[in-house]
């Protein structure tokens, strides 16, 4: 048995990484994990902090906020408040994963299994990533955007560009198309198209500038018309195409931020699924290695210790509690799916008649390919996990004096908890729903946004006002934001701030 | 398919630009922190990094999010005693359970300040900013003490340019002797035997044996020849090590008037000037001592803390401090061993009859011993007798003596420039 061991000490070498990678990849293949080619980069702690600051992007444009992130990480690390993550992986083809040189061989193997086969296969398989991002061209696009922004900085000054980026970043979460699929473009095409776009756009926006008086007849014929004719949820897109005062290069920068937002959008929607998937596979792959005698007890103990740390879920009353750990939730769901397929109980047959007893590998792949967090939880959160995590629900209604516990982990509560938890991962609920409602084409060209309240949740006043200032910088004319509850405007914000009290219901 | 790439040798400062942008953006905050640090720190401790903290709200990047209120329904793990239908009192902010996401992230881990470290270079950069130093000078100040390469023996590894031929050949020679020793001894024995055989009369000679011996000797000699003349193993290289440039020691006298007329602001300004001088000396000399002497009507050597922060009242006799300095030089800092610098800060007040005494003391006793003496008068008012007395000193020692009036911080540098000019010339 001992002769099967890949290594005995905890030190790693490049040869060993190669050997482990090969072993893990063979096992992964036997589990039908289909992944992009891997590019494993060994880096040191300082480089890891760099990678952190740039969200794992190997290349990125310069902005002070990344510097802030870096200083923050650096401080935490130096003080020993936090260890660095063992890995960062980004969705590209080839899939780039960073390994820290300080890690032991066991940890490197864990990272390889987790990132290079877990996350990687998720990026390649999940429908959101397939539909919304193009792993092949992202690096190209990053190169393009960085070069473009550097050029702008040279031409228009660092400060100008920084201001613009600040404003775009404030609206980044509202720079995504939720329903329309953008199509991927490579670097060359992007540069070529960019020039064409510049020209074209300059001609387009002039509609807002039309000053030639319209004839009386047409004025009469033209009833009061909304612009845009339908509400727009992609604020950055709307600005890029319609803001009257932006220069062509500014539109391009808005576009760059918007594209990046779009690229990260699936990641924000699949946190639980993605981390759960990667955790499930590092656990399964490495245990298989142990079963086959490729690694020794010391190795697997180190892995398990780290694994339990990753999927640790503090209770709600613990000082370490900061919400549900996506690793725990995801890992539990995938593991329980496997259990239900292999050893279904009576309860499972009742709740999951299709799944219990089916092929676990197929079921897991199906679950990974076709869902996002919200629907994944809705579909697969089993009563057993609800009991295991002792989940309970709390309703906090500001119109009532008490908090209520409508459901806990029992027969009556499973469905309610499952639905509520699924809602909790619905980005649409999590972020305020804000849309472009109208532009006053005939008057002062002011832009009106509408916020549709969900369960009467109001906007945070201070940040809303600040974001409006950024929006004002981009749009160039007055901005109004109306907050609606049950079709009635209950609160409104303005930039520049109006003289009268800002939050009187109209 | 997997590619493994070692990126550890790549430049690690990918975030440098971003970091600098951040620092630039929050310049005013950092400057404030640096200014505070300068007043708090000791002069000799000035060239270190500093912890900067900025209120979190000043650097937040706003995005739309929900404020408190409305109806929130959330799921939490780890239920202990709740059952469906329970009603609970609303927990106070920060309590573990209960309220929704918005609050949970707001209360976070309760950090209101964004704290980070700036490096020594950055610290000095910010410190000098007020002083309007030209870049070149700043760079000289910031630069660590210069180093030079010094020969130190030989090593067995190095670059071809550093090859030490004599030592290499010597060790090659030694190796050849060592490796060939056994063979040579054998040859010697065989040769001896051969010689003996050859001495015998020709008829009784054992020609067979002679033939064998000659052959054996040739074989061994050939083997000797195969020992390489020089081997990589023999190569020796000159070894150089970095050493700080040898330089002698310097002592800096900080002289300051602490009479009632000196305010804390004036003292802070003086402190900056002293700091500059200290950094300058520290760069040029391996060892820099600082002596603090304060005076009102009488002078006293004190520690830094007392120097800058204790307050005295009363009149002013400047000559007292010059006497004290002269004494200390005599006792501890012989001009032959020490480069002596002195910086005097005062608001110009002096007892009128004392100023000529000061002048004479400087001219006859102190100036011949010091490298440079700078006098800064920190006052927006008219000059008094002391200034005019010092102007006479300046006439005699125009190179070594400088006097300047400072009314605000930006004036410090021109005074200081004198020092650099003198060195450059």
Image: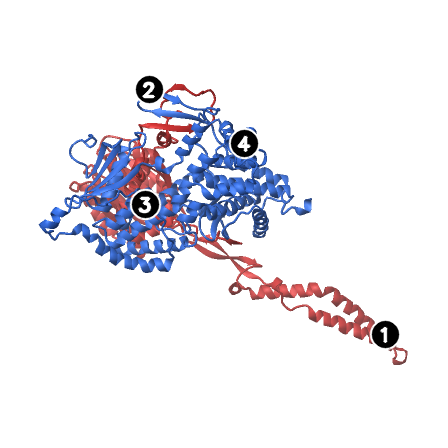
Chain colours: A blue, B red
Distance (Cα) linking label 2 and label 3 = 38 Å
Chain-order first, disc 2 or disc 3:
3
Q: Which residue is mark 4?
A: A349
Most extreme residue toward the right is B204
Q: Secondary structure at mark 2?
A: loop
Q: Chain of mark 2?
A: A
Tell which tag, 4 or 3, sits nearer the viewer: 4
Q: Secondary structure at mark 1?
A: helix
Query: Callout 3 environment at 10 Å: few (<14), some (14 to 19), or many (20+)?
Result: many
Distance (Cα) linking label 4 and label 2 = 41 Å
Disc assigned to residue B282 = none
Disc assigned to residue A175 = 3
Distance (Cα) linking label 4 and label 3 = 43 Å
Q: Chain of mark 4?
A: A
Query: Callout 4 environment at 10 Å: few (<14), some (14 to 19), or many (20+)?
Result: some
Q: Secondary structure at mark 4?
A: helix
Tell which tag, 4 or 1, sits nearer the viewer: 4
Task: Decide if residue B406 is on the left or right side of residue B150.
Answer: left
Residues at badges 4 and 1 in contact (C-beta under 8 Å)? no
Please state, as top left, top right, bottom left or bottom right, where the C terminus of chain B lies in the image. Answer: bottom left
User: Are discs 2 and 3 both within one chain?
Assistant: yes
Tell which tag, 4 or 2, sits nearer the viewer: 4
Q: Secondary structure at mark 3?
A: loop
Task: Decide if residue A274 is on the left or right side of residue B237.
Answer: left
Query: Callout 2 environment at 10 Å: few (<14), some (14 to 19), or many (20+)?
Result: few
Chain-order first, disc 4 or disc 2:
4
């Amino acid at each position: 048995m001992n002769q099967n061991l890949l290594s005995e000490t905890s030190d790693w070498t490049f040869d060993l990484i190669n050997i482990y990678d090969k072993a893990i990849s063979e096992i992964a293949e036997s589990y039908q994990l289909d992944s992009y080619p891997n590019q494993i980069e060994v880096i040191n702690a300082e480089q890891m902090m760099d990678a952190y600051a740039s969200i794992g992007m190997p290349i990125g444009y310069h902005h002070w906020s990344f510097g802030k992130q870096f200083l923050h990480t650096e401080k935490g690390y130096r003080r020993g408040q936090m260890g660095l993550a063992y890995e960062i992986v980004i969705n590209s083809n080839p899939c780039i994963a960073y390994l820290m040189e300080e890690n032991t061989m066991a940890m490197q193997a864990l990272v390889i299994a987790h990132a290079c086969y877990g996350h990687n296969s998720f990026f390649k398989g999940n429908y959101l990533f397939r539909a919304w991002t193009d792993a092949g061209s992202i690096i190209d696009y990053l190169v393009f955007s960085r070069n473009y922004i550097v050029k702008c900085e040279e031409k228009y000054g660092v400060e100008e560009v920084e201001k613009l980026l600040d404003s775009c970043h404030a609206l980044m979460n509202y720079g995504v198309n939720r329903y329309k699929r953008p199509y991927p473009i490579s670097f060359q095409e992007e540069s070529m198209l960019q020039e064409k776009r510049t020209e074209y756009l300059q001609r387009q926006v002039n509609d807002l500038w039309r000053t030639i008086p319209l004839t009386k007849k047409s004025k009469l014929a033209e009833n009061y018309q909304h612009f845009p004719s339908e509400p727009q949820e992609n604020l950055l897109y709307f600005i890029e195409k319609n803001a009257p005062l932006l220069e062509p290069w500014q539109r391009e920068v808005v576009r760059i931020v918007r594209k990046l937002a779009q690229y990260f959008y699936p990641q924000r929607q699949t946190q639980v699924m993605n981390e759960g998937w990667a955790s499930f596979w590092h656990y399964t792959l490495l245990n298989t290695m142990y079963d086959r005698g490729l690694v020794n007890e010391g190795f697997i103990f180190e892995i398990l210790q780290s694994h339990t740390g990753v999927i640790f879920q503090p209770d709600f009353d613990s000082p370490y509690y900061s919400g549900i750990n996506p690793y725990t939730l995801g890992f539990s769901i995938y593991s329980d799916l496997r259990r239900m397929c292999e050893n279904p109980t009576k309860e499972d047959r009742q709740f999951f008649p299709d799944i219990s007893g089916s092929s676990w590998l197929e079921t897991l792949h199906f679950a990974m390919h076709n869902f996002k967090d919200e629907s994944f939880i809705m579909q697969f959160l089993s009563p057993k996990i609800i009991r295991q995590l002792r989940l309970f629900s709390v309703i906090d209604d500001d119109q009532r004096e008490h908090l209520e516990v409508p459901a806990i982990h029992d027969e009556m509560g499973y469905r309610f908890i499952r639905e509520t938890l699924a809602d909790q991962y619905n980005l649409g609920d999590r972020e305020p729903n804000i849309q472009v409602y109208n532009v006053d084409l005939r008057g002062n060209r002011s832009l009106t946004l509408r916020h549709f309240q969900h369960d009467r949740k109001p906007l945070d006043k201070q940040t809303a006002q600040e974001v409006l200032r950024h929006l004002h910088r981009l749009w160039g004319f007055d901005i109004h934001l109306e907050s609606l509850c049950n079709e009635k405007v209950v609160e409104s914000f303005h930039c520049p701030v109006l003289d009268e009290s800002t939050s009187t219901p109209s | 398919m997997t590619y493994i790439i070692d990126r550890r040798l790549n430049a690690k400062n990918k975030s440098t630009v971003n970091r600098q942008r951040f620092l630039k953006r929050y310049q005013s905050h950092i400057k404030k922190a640096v200014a505070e640090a300068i007043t708090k720190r000791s002069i000799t401790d000035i060239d270190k990094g500093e912890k900067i903290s900025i209120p979190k709200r000043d650097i937040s990047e706003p995005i739309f999010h929900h404020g408190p209120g409305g109806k929130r329904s959330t799921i939490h793990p780890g239920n202990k005693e709740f059952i469906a239908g329970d009603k609970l009192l609303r927990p106070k902010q920060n309590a573990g359970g209960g309220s929704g996401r918005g609050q949970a992230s707001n209360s976070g881990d309760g950090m209101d300040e964004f704290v980070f470290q700036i490096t020594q270079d950055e610290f000095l950069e910010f410190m000098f900013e007020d002083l309007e130093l030209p870049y070149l000078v700043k760079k000289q100040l910031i630069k660590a003490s210069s180093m030079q390469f010094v020969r130190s023996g030989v090593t067995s590894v190095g670059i071809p340019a550093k090859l030490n031929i004599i030592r290499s050949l010597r060790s090659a020679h030694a190796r050849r002797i060592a490796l060939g020793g056994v063979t040579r001894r054998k040859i010697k024995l065989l040769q001896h035997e051969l010689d003996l055989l050859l001495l015998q009369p020709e008829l009784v000679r054992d020609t067979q044996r002679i033939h064998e011996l000659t052959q054996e000797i040739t074989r061994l000699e050939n083997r000797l020849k195969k020992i390489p003349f020089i081997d990589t193993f023999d190569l020796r290289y000159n070894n150089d090590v970095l050493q700080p440039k040898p330089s002698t020691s310097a002592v800096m006298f900080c002289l300051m008037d602490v009479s009632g007329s000196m305010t804390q602001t004036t003292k802070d300004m003086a402190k900056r000037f002293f700091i500059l001088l200290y950094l300058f000396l520290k760069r040029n000399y391996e060892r820099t001592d600082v002596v603090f002497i304060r005076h009102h009507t009488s002078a006293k050597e004190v520690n830094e803390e007392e120097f800058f922060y204790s307050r005295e009242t009363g009149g002013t006799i400047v000559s007292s401090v010059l006497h004290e300095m002269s004494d200390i030089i005599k006792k501890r800092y012989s001009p032959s061993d020490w480069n002596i610098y002195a910086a005097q800060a005062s608001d110009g007040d002096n007892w009128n009859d004392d100023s000529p005494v000061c002048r004479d003391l400087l001219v006859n006793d102190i100036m011949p011993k010091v490298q440079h003496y700078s006098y800064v008068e920190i006052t927006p008012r008219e000059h008094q007798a002391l200034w005019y007395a010092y102007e006479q000193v300046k006439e005699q020692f125009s190179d070594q003596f400088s006097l300047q009036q400072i009314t605000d911080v930006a004036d410090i540098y021109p005074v200081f420039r004198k020092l650099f000019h003198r060195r450059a010339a």
